[in-house]
Image: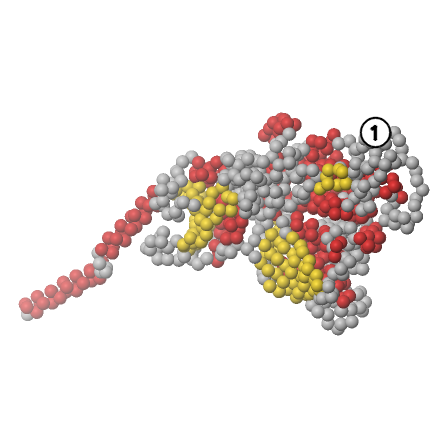
């Protein structure tokens, strides 16, 4: 094999940004192992990757993560472990294959080569992990995950430095897309890994009670009700402390004002949000301090929170002079143009950078659920050290959960930054799905021919080996629409491991295909393991709501109507007293309505919520109801909110599986001493037992909870008897038995008195 001839190192003025072995003059030599045939030597034998690259990636949503871990049991913990066991090597394999498709001269960069070796080492470790069946095996697996997370701390600085150093060999925008795809995939792996570690820690804690619903807003790394104002104030205080001179001298730190909908909440990973807000506030504070360095009171930084039905928008406004024109083209890029050298020097001073897990805990930061806060990333380096990756990294974080980040600059005045956050938490993680073409810049070989540098990168959408759209991806709607598509995954309640609420088997809803193809080897392995296979694979089979190709919204399997009955006279016409609130046909429509409804605890006494399939009236006499009945659960006051929410998502999210056709609707009745939850069904048959068991499993009632069946015939007969008694009572007139008896007694006394007088 022809070896590359050793060259003298050029002077620093020739190629100041690159090592000598990466100068453009050696591209054609390093790129081809055989200059006579022009054949390219692969970066590493790909046989170990082929199987895993062909496997699809299964994205998840925030609501899936939250509701799966809300009632934590041993089966769910093991299911989570096996999901992570299959997802980590699959996601690593896709990234390794992307790096193998890079030009060889790029991958031989020392920094990118280190990233590759770290990924390959972890891939070899995780792909050999067998099925996890016991808690002891899960503890061993968690130790491997923790070690891998620590080993990968150098990935971000090495990745960015490698991208900066290789900008002479590839187009900058292509390298940016490659870096963003790598970082987004890195976030996805850390999310599922850290979530499982947090669930394991919770399960092993002495205070954990199996089968008991967690009342904490934190479930693992996910915060269900993340308050925007609190996060802004906490991040702002940390950013102010970092920018303030230690000795008290220097420019005055500007004030931060929070305005707008200060009570807005949404589900989010707190570490991600803190990183984004911390970087935006830190940039604004530094800009204002530099612009108004001599002012005794610099203009404040205003943060406006706007809450919309499906999103929360946060605007950061400062008067820091705006963004210089020469920097704007590189604002969202990891390529910093004329400032590349300075950024390389700064990155060289930060050998490790977590961005979501931190090395040092800042004293002013409060921990959410035992995890480190991303605010310490801000404190892990001096404020004067500019890495040039805060805004690009923040944009990757914002877009990861289907949000966005934009900047509008008025040069000479200031900047407005707009952070958009999905409020519902039902969007799957947004993995990169664009087709990139990685190529080197045109290089001439010795014989005068052009180097064939076009190299495919990420030639297909993630998660599909045949260039088909991924049903989990909100960015790639399918070409056809199924009327029976299961909406559960879009709710975060899919029929897989993250949604079955501890079910040992997760059959698919009839009429909704899985959308995934398994290789022959996977099928054989699945058949061999049989019943011992855990729910980790079930998550791979989970169905999702397919978005309408025109509207992009996720259609439900059934259309539903929501009703409200205010307090009324018990003798009034029941059906006339019910008011329709809204019709619901999509996941987005449900959350848009539900987020604006009062919770049952806030309703007046003797009022009801009804939710029924479209075409079924919420009365006993309806054609679909009259032969059926209802399962009744009497609840103590104060617990109806969470049971009603879980029941709604189970009904609309199609969690009753093959018995879903028999469910007509549900009613929540608010009464003075208790609240009554009832599920209405079409028939009084064997499937009603399955419905009862599903209710018990999904709502996780205490063992002594009594679920009572009552047919509508009995209800109608009881109501008829009451009406007849009331009618007879009304026809008897206004008189009362006591008064009539008293009148007859007085009449007899009068007659006796008259007879006595006559005798006298």
Q: Position of residue 217 (x, y in %)?
A: 60, 52
Residue at which label 1 appears? 37
Instruction: Please name whichever residue, 87 or 285, is drawn nearer the observer in this view of the structure.
Output: 285
- Secondary structure under badge 1? loop
Image mark count? 1
Q: Position of residue 248 (x, y in %)?
A: 79, 68
Q: Position of residue 3 (x, y in %)?
A: 89, 33
Residue extending furthest front? 448
Kindly tell me whether residue 564 is visible in this rendering: yes
Q: Residue at x 78, y 59 (%)?
A: 383
Q: Residue at x 11, y 65 (%)?
A: 751
Task: Using the rendered view, name the quadrant where residue 391 is placed.
Answer: bottom right
In the rendered view, would you say 83 is above or below 594?
above
Q: Is residue 464 left or right of residue 649?
A: right
Q: Is residue 127 left or right of residue 758?
A: right
In the rendered view, would you say 232 is above or below 702?
below
Kindly tell me whether residue 85 is visible in this rendering: no
Residue extending furthest left? 759
Q: Residue at x 60, y 28 (%)?
A: 530
Q: Quadrant location of the N terminus?
A: top right
Q: Residue at x 79, y 35 (%)?
A: 43
Q: Quadrant location of the C terminus?
A: bottom left
Q: Is residue 340 left or right of residue 665?
A: right
Residue extending furthest right? 8
Q: Position of residue 285 (x, y in %)?
A: 73, 63
Task: Using the rendered view, name the quadrant where residue 420 is placed.
Answer: bottom right
Q: How is the image coloured?
A: secondary structure
Instruction: Please name whichever residue, 197 or 238, is drawn nearer the observer in this view of the structure.
Output: 238
Q: Residues within 10 Å of mark 1 (few under 14, many from 20)?
A: few
């Amino acid at each position: 094999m022809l070896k590359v001839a050793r060259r003298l190192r050029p002077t620093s003025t020739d190629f100041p940004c690159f090592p000598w072995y990466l100068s453009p003059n050696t591209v054609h030599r390093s790129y081809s192992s055989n200059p006579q045939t022009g054949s390219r030597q692969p970066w590493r034998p790909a046989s170990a990757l082929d199987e895993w690259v062909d496997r699809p990636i299964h994205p998840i949503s925030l609501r899936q993560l939250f509701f799966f871990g809300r009632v934590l049991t041993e089966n769910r913990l093991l299911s989570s472990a096996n999901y992570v066991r299959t997802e980590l090597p699959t996601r690593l394999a896709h990234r390794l294959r992307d790096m193998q498709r890079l030009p060889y001269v790029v991958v031989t960069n020392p920094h990118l080569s280190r990233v590759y070796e770290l990924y390959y080492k972890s891939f070899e470790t995780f792909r050999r992990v067998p099925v996890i069946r016991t808690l002891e095996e899960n503890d061993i697996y968690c130790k491997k995950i923790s070690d891998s997370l620590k080993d990968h701390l150098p990935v971000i600085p090495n990745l960015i430095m490698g991208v900066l150093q290789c900008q002479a060999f590839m187009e900058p925008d292509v390298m940016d897309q490659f870096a963003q795809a790598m970082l987004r995939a890195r976030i996805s792996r850390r999310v599922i890994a850290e979530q499982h570690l947090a669930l394991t820690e919770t399960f092993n804690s002495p205070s954990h009670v199996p089968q008991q619903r967690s009342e904490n807003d934190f479930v693992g790394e996910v915060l269900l009700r993340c308050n925007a104002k609190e996060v802004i104030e906490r991040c702002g205080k940390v950013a102010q402390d970092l920018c303030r001179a230690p000795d008290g001298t220097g420019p005055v730190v500007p004030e931060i004002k929070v305005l707008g909908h200060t009570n807005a909440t949404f589900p989010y990973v707190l570490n991600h949000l803190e990183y984004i807000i911390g970087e935006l506030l830190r940039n604004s504070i530094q800009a204002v301090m530099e612009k108004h360095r001599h002012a005794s009171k610099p203009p404040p930084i205003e943060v406006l929170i706007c809450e919309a039905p499906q999103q929360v928008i946060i605007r950061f406004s400062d008067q820091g002079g705006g963004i210089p024109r020469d920097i704007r083209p590189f604002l969202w890029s990891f390529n910093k143009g004329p400032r590349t050298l300075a950024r390389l020097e700064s990155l060289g001073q930060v050998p490790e950078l977590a961005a979501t897990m931190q090395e040092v805990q800042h004293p002013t930061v409060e921990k959410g659920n035992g995890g480190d806060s991303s605010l310490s990333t801000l404190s892990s380096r001096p404020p004067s050290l500019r890495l040039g990756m805060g805004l690009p990294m923040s944009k990757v974080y914002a877009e990861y959960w289907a949000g966005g980040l934009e900047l509008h600059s008025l040069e000479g005045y200031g900047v407005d930054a707009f952070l958009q956050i999905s409020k519902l938490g039902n969007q799957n993680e947004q993995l990169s799905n664009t087709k990139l073409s990685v190529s080197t810049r045109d290089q001439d070989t010795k014989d005068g021919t052009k180097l064939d540098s076009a190299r495919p990168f990420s030639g297909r959408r993630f998660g599909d080996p045949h260039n088909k759209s991924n049903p989990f991806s909100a960015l790639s709607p399918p070409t056809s629409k199924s009327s029976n598509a299961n909406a559960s995954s879009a709710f975060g309640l899919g029929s897989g491991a993250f949604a079955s609420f501890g079910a040992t088997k997760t059959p698919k809803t009839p009429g909704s295909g899985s959308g995934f193809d398994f290789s022959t080897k996977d099928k054989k392995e699945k058949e061999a393991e049989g019943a011992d296979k855990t729910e980790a694979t079930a998550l791979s089979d989970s169905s999702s709501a397919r978005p309408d190709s025109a509207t992009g919204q996720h259609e439900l399997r059934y259309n539903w109507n929501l009703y409200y009955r205010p307090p009324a006279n018990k003798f009034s016409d029941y059906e006339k007293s019910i008011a329709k609130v809204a019709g619901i046909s999509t996941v987005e429509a449900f959350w848009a309505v539900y987020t604006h409804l009062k919770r049952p605890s806030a309703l007046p006494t003797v009022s009801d919520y009804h939710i029924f399939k479209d075409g079924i009236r919420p009365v006993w006499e309806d054609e679909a109801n009259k032969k059926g009945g209802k399962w009744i659960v009497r609840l103590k006051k104060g617990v109806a909110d969470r049971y009603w929410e879980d029941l709604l998502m189970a009904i609309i999210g199609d969690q009753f599986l093959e018995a879903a056709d028999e469910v007509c609707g549900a009613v929540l009745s608010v009464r003075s001493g208790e609240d009554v939850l009832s599920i209405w069904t079409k028939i009084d048959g064997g499937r009603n037992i399955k419905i009862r068991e599903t209710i018990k499993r999904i709502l996780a009632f205490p063992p002594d909870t009594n679920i009572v069946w009552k047919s509508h015939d009995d209800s109608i007969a009881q109501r008829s008897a009451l009406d007849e008694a009331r009618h007879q009572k009304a026809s008897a007139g206004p008189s009362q038995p006591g008064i009539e008896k008293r009148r007859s007694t007085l009449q007899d006394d009068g007659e006796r008195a008259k007879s006595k007088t006559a005798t006298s």
